[in-house]
Amino acid sequence: MRHFALPLLAGLFLWPASGRADAATAEALFRQGKDLMVKKQYGEACPKLAESQRLDPATGTLLALALCYEQAGLTASAWSTYSDVIARARLENSPEREQAARTRSAALEPNLARLTVKVPAGLLSLSDLEVKRDEVVLGAAALGQALPVDPGSHSVEVRASGKLPWTTKVQVTAAGRAVVDVPALADAPRPTTTSVAPVASSPVAPVRPPADTSRATLRTVSWITGGAGVVLLGVGGILAAQAVSKNKDSSANCDGNLCTDQGKQDRDDARSAGNLATGAAVVGVALAATGVTLFVLSRGKPDAAVSRLQLSPTVAPGQGGLWFRGAF
């Protein structure tokens, strides 16, 4: 009986309907698919027929596609496509195609592979529950039902907010039955928030320069100041000697306060040298005293640091001096 049915079906889908803009492409794909079916290359033939049907829907092409699926062993796809042929043939008043499709559909139905996806009641109550079979979402009415599938491997994926996703694969044999029991989904880990306790700030001790550095600085200044004082005292001594010498020279050219021009010059030079000697001596003594004072302080306690030091030279007619101020 099967040998007679196949030629009959082949004769029914030889002339697909056309008339659309893509009719030429659809016709070419239909012929290629038909030739591949003759060669039993169903894996290549079925996609060409499916594309031809998409471009230019026709009952003959749809019937050829159903037969291709059946020969390829895709029984659920064939059974579903035969159902589409029955509906189109009835609308087109084509009883021969309708009867041929009914015959093939009835022969396939008892041996369809079926897959049942069972979901526990706790998950069914979740409003955002999503169950997919082979990337196709199954509605609530499809869950728990033995639905036709093509033989082979099938994936089932379940997702819900606040839950870890669950997925599995199941192998369904030809005319076989398979059941997937979805377990209760585990709760997804909640994001943890880490609280950082405020760190109490401890008082920071004031930073002081190292004691050795302060004392070393004072010691250096004391040597410089004292040395300058000694130099000025030496200069003052030399100037004083010059003043005495010039004063003696003026005696040979002066009689009391009456002096020759040379005597007057010698006395003026003696007076100038004496004034300079006095100023140098005063400043020298002050600097020497300052140097000694700083040297003594540099050898004292580490905390005895000098916070302010000021030297103020003073010059007046006939005298000179140096003011020394410091805060310790």
Image (spheres, rainbow, N blue to C red):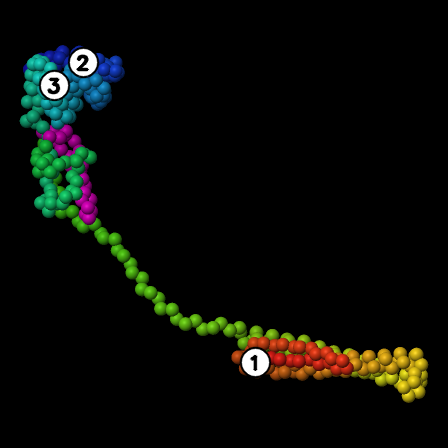
Indicate yes or no whether the magenta region holds residue 156.
yes
Q: Position of residue 167 (x, y in %)?
A: 19, 41
Prevailing SS of the magenta stretch: strand
Q: Secondary structure at mark 2?
A: loop
- Give whichever of discs 1 and 2 has the lower sequence position: 2
Image quadrant where residue 266 sits: bottom right
Give me the disc on residue 88. Answer: 3
Is label 1 or label 2 in front?
1
Q: Residues within 10 Å of mark 2 (few under 14, many from 20)?
A: some
Looking at the rendered structure, which numbered label has been put on residue 328?
1
Distance, label 1 to label 2, CA atoms, is: 115 Å
* Kind of residue at disc 2: Ala
> Relative to 315, does residue 138 appear above or below in the rendering?
above
Q: Position of residue 84 (x, y in %)?
A: 12, 22
| Residue 20 lies in the magenta-colored region | no
Q: Nearer the viewer, residue 71 or 91?
A: 91
Callout 3: 10 Å neighbours few (<14), some, many (20+)?
some
Residue under numbered circle 2? 17
First in residue order: circle 2 vs circle 3:
2
Which residue sits at x=83%, y=81%?
Answer: 271
Res. 97 image quadrant:
top left
Q: Are marks 1 and 3 in contact (CB under 8 Å)?
A: no
* Span shown in magenta: 148-175
Q: Residue at x 16, y 19 (%)?
A: 62
Whether residue 33 is visible here, answered yes or no, is: no
* Between discs 1 and 3, the one toward the N terminus: 3
Can you say which quadrant of the picture contains the N terminus?
Answer: top left
Kind of residue at badge 3: Arg
Which of discs 1 and 3 lies nearer the camera? The answer is 1
Direction front: furthest residue: 258
Neighbour class for label 1 at 10 Å: few (<14), some, many (≥20)?
Answer: few
Under mark 1, the amino acid is Phe
